[in-house]
Image (cartoon, rainbow, N blue to C red):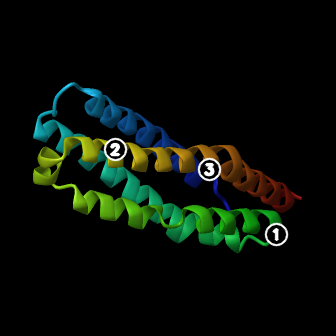
Amino acid sequence: MHLVHEMRRLRAEHAALTTLSGFLMDLLAAPELPRPTELAAVRSMFRDTLVRHLKCEDWILYPRLKASGDAELSRLARQFVGEMGHLAEDFVAYDARWTEAEIAGDWPGFCRETEAILDAIGMRIEREESDLYPAAEQLDSSLGEMARH
């Protein structure tokens, strides 16, 4: 299981999501509704990056970690899926609900829901970066050492 390149890409996507989340939060903090095209552009970039990232994690990374043969890493991956596996569905529902017309009609509601979903995504990123990714990289490093001997 060579995860080095995969992990590098996933970490880069975390950085991009964090940056785009910051752009969205800046738009939410503006005293008035931002231009629809500006908001739509940032939301689209965030959505595309997040969906690609979650698909890779949920369909490739997590199953690989669960099947790694390392009991602790498998447990950790199952725990993350159990705690945060619903995030993709939650985001899709949020994104579909908030059309341009809905946003214009309920800017405060959109701001509240956007902050909540961005917080949930941010917490997942932090936990993956601090707990899951280092464990996966450690396993990959250990397997690489064993293969060289």
- Residue type (three-letter) at the residue carrying disc 1: Ala
The residue lying toward the viewer, choosing from 95 and 101, is 101
For the residues marked 3 and 1, what is the alpha-carbon distance in whole angstroms? 18 Å
Residue positioned 74% across, 68% down in the render: 74
Disc 1 crowd rating (10 Å Cα; few below 14, some 14-19, many 20+) is: few
Disc 3 crowd rating (10 Å Cα; few below 14, some 14-19, many 20+) is: some
The percent position of residue 23, horizontal first and vertical second, equals 32, 32
The image quarter containing residue 55 is bottom left
Q: Is residue 66 left or right of residue 149?
A: left
Identify the secondary structure beneath mark 3: helix
Question: In the rendered image of this protein, does residue 6 appear above or below residue 108?
Answer: below
The percent position of residue 135, horizontal first and vertical second, equals 74, 53
Identify the secondary structure beneath mark 2: helix
Disc 2 crowd rating (10 Å Cα; few below 14, some 14-19, many 20+) is: few
Q: Which residue is mark 3?
A: 128
- Residue type (three-letter) at the residue carrying disc 2: Arg
- Residue type (three-letter) at the residue carrying disc 3: Glu
Q: Are marks 2 and 3 in contact (CB under 8 Å)?
A: no
Identify the secondary structure beneath mark 1: helix
Q: How many marks?
A: 3
The image quarter containing residue 39 is top left
Q: Which residue is mark 1?
A: 71
Q: Is residue 136 left or right of residue 86?
A: right
For the residues marked 2 and 3, what is the alpha-carbon distance in whole angstroms? 24 Å
The percent position of residue 87, horizontal first and vertical second, equals 46, 61
Q: Which residue is mark 2?
A: 112
For the residues marked 2 and 1, what is the alpha-carbon distance in whole angstroms? 39 Å
Please report whichever mark, 3 or 1, sits nearer to the chain's N-terminal start.
1
Q: Are marks 3 and 1 in contact (CB under 8 Å)?
A: no
Looking at the rendered image, the quarter that the C terminus falls into is bottom right
